[in-house]
Amino acid sequence: MADDDDVRRLALALPQVVEVDSEGFDFRVADKGFVWSYPERRPGTSRLIRTDVAVLYVGDEAEKQALLLGEPEVFFTTPAYHGLPLVMLRLAQVDVDRLTELVTDAWRMRAPEPLVNDLDDGTDPAGATG
């Protein structure tokens, strides 16, 4: 079972990641967000920052739909994210190895190509452990 501490550790292990000051977690590479805490919108009240749910950049609608349909117990979306290449991930439903894969993939899609190439030439900087 993964948690927000795992997200933080994995994201910060990747090259040139910056953590943006927030109520939960919010990570960017080259000024592009790739994983952050889910800001749950609740009618009539202020939003609730959920650190048990991560918003992940997935690249495109096909990947988003594949995750949502293939693992509905793990991934979900809301109308606010319609048309955006983002999914919400229930952290408690994945282990650290799977989280490592998901966070690294999100980073790869947002990082500049030279950074991705540098990562591919080296070892796994996130040091995946389960």
Image (spheres, grey):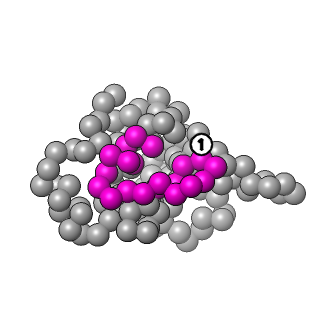
Comparing 15 with 59, the one in front is 15
98 drawn magenta:
no
Inspect the magenta stretch and tell me whether residue 24 lies in it.
Answer: yes
Instruction: Please say whether residue 62 is visible from this viewpoint.
Output: no
Depicted 29 relative to depicted 11: above or below: below
Counting every numbered tag in the picture gives 1
Mark yes or no: residue 17 visible.
yes
Furthest toward the left, the residue is 121
Is 60 left, or right, of 118 in this rendering? Answer: right
- Between 74 and 53, which is closer to the camera in this rendering? 53
Residue at image coords 45%, 42%: 7
- The residue shown at (38%, 48%) is 12
Residue 112 or residue 53, whichever sits in front: 112
Q: Secondary structure at mark 1?
A: strand
Residue of label 1? 51
Residue type, mark 1 in image: Thr
Please state the horizontal and vertical placement of residue 24, each as a whole percent of the image.
Answer: 60, 47
Q: Residue furthest right?
A: 44
Q: Position of residue 11 (x, y in %)?
A: 39, 48
Which segment is the magenta one? 8-27
Q: Is residue 126 left or right of residue 44?
A: left
Task: Write the residue at 34% across / 36% down.
Answer: 97
